[in-house]
Image: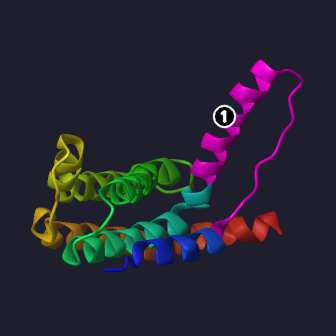
Amino acid sequence: MKSILPLLLVLLATLSSSGCGGTSTSAATEAGQDEHEHHHHHEEEHRPRDFPDAVGKAGLRHRGVLWELEHEHGDRQEFAHEFGEFLDVIDWLPEFAADSDMRKAEWDRVHAATARLRGAHAVVERKLAEGTTPTAGDVDVEAANAAFEELESVRAETRALFEKKKGDQL
């Protein structure tokens, strides 16, 4: 069965793409630079711009993960890669919150929701690490949904912080 996750990722990349570049002077430096640029470019492709963007992308990726698990993802290696990017976005949520003007109480809510999201997907992560095939039943959907509701609540409550920041940049 054809995977929808690559389509979601193309959409995400289109919405948040950024380029990388650079030159080097020696073959050894070039090889190291290419590796660095590849990693940097790869990270930039799925790294959100800010907290509101991260909440949205985490939600999209979560739905993509669930879809893949429900429809028996075909390529375990590709799924593991995409799942890893999903975990990256989850892990960046507290960082984006900390880099904003959020109050500590809001950051605490983001941190707690992030921990619940990681916990909700822990069995999938463990199975992928063990080389076994995860299923949709391995995600605690109720806990994940509650965590996303909390993140959406914080995003709504702090929207003005990010709109002001965008206005200041213009």
Which residue is more in the foreground, 135 or 58?
A: 135
Quadrant of the rendered structure where residue 60 is?
A: bottom left
Look at the picture and state if 31 lies above or below 142.
above
Q: Nearer the viewer, residue 38 or 161?
A: 38
- Asked whether 88 or 53 is in front, the reply is 88
Give the total of numbered labels: 1
- Where is residue 134? Give x, y as percent: 17, 59
Question: Where residue 16 appears, x then y in whole percent?
Answer: 64, 67
**Magenta segment includes 93:** no
Using residue 23 as the reference point, say whether residue 129 is left or right of it.
left
Amino acid of disc 1 = His
From this view, report whether residue 163 is shown above or below residue 77: below
Taking the spot 35% from the left edge, 53% from the top edge, the residue there is: 77
Residue 127 vs residue 99, the one in the foreground: 127
Q: Position of residue 66 (x, y in %)?
A: 26, 73
Residue extent of the magenta highlight: 16-44
**Is residue 52 left or right of 44 when viewed as pictured?**
left
Q: Which residue is labeled 1 in the image?
A: 36
Q: Quadrant of residue 149?
A: bottom left
Look at the image and tell me in which quarter the N terminus lies.
Answer: bottom left
**Is disc 1 placed on a helix, strand or loop?**
helix
Q: Residue at horizontal 17%, vertical 57%?
A: 133
Outermost residue to the left? 137
The image quadrant that residue 62 belongs to is bottom left
Q: Residues within 10 Å of mark 1 (few under 14, many from 20)?
A: few
Colour mode?
Answer: rainbow
- Taking the spot 48% from the left edge, 54% from the top edge, the residue there is 97
Relative to 127, 150 lies left or right: right
